[in-house]
Amino acid sequence: RTEFFATMRILQRGDLTEDQLKGSWAGAFGHTQFMPSTYERLAVDFDGDGRRDLVSSTADALASTANFLNKAGWQTGMPWGFEVQIPAGMSIDGEGRRSKKPLSSWSARGVTRIDGSPLIQGPLSGSTPAGLMAPAGPSGPVFLVFKNFDAIYSYNAAESYGLAIAHLSDRLRGAGPFVSSWPTDDPGTSRAERREIQQFLINRGYDIGAVDGLIGDKTRVAIRQEQTRLGLNPTGRAGQQILRAFRQEQARKMMQ
């Protein structure tokens, strides 16, 4: 209902016409896919024609997206994060995007940039907070991420989305690909399969929110706990390994 009334106000204001309201299943529309309530709150008229038109005006769309990131805490001149090396045997249990620590703390634990150089360079100081993110577990690429990654994440609450956008921005500036290989022993899952994993977790009593196939922090923490219980490597990855383990456990219960 909130999004519907926001849409009506956008039309009433004259920013868009009815025939421009074509969007995704969730209701987002325009070049950079704003939900109506976000559109109403953060869209800007950058081309000066008196309308905030994110559908037909590229200038309005890009400026509105910049406004979104600015309001979300984007820090100009600071990185989103970078790939790192962690020492052999270093536990990453409990670490994540939100569990930020000063860079000096990560340096003291032996974490370096992926090329072996120090973490603290350029605009970064020892007090800069950073969270350790391992989307594929410790056997895949590992990253330290900063507040700018959180700003991207707020645009679309999926670490895979945030990482894709952040990496694309690096590549557009001439940076190379990630150095560490993505693991092949635990293939990824479809959105339907991720919903299945989430339903298993809810049935086990975890409060992870909606069954939507989007893997957030609560789901990752729950997966780690279940991986530990099942004798698996606690990566927090919503891959085929944990899905198979859940299915096998459910099948055993049905046979009893």
Image (cartoon, rainbow, N blue to C red):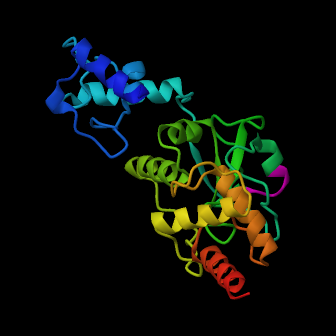
The magenta segment: 107-111
Q: Residue furthest bottom?
A: 255
Please report the residue visible at 76 percent of the width from the left and 43 percent of the height from the top. 103
- Name the quadrant of the C terminus: bottom right
Q: Nearer the viewer, residue 237 or 219?
A: 219
User: Residue 62 lies in magenta, yes or no?
Assistant: no
Q: Nearer the viewer, residue 184 or 118?
A: 184
Instruction: Tell whether 246 sits left or right of 153.
Output: right
Instruction: Tell whether 237 sits left or right of 67.
Output: right
- Name the quadrant of the N terminus: top left
Please report the residue visible at 67 percent of the width from the left and 47 percent of the height from the top. 97
Q: Is residue 216 above or below residue 127?
A: below
Residue 123 spot, x, y in % from top left: 63, 34
Please report the residue visible at 58 percent of the width from the left and 69 percent of the height from the top. 180
Q: Quadrant of residue 129?
A: top right
Please report the residue visible at 33 percent of the width from the left and 46 percent of the height from the top. 25
Whether residue 90 is visible: yes
Residue 81 spot, x, y in % from top left: 60, 46
State whether the magenta stretch is mostly helix, strand or loop: loop
Residue 252 spot, x, y in % from top left: 70, 85
Q: Nearer the viewer, residue 224 or 4?
A: 4
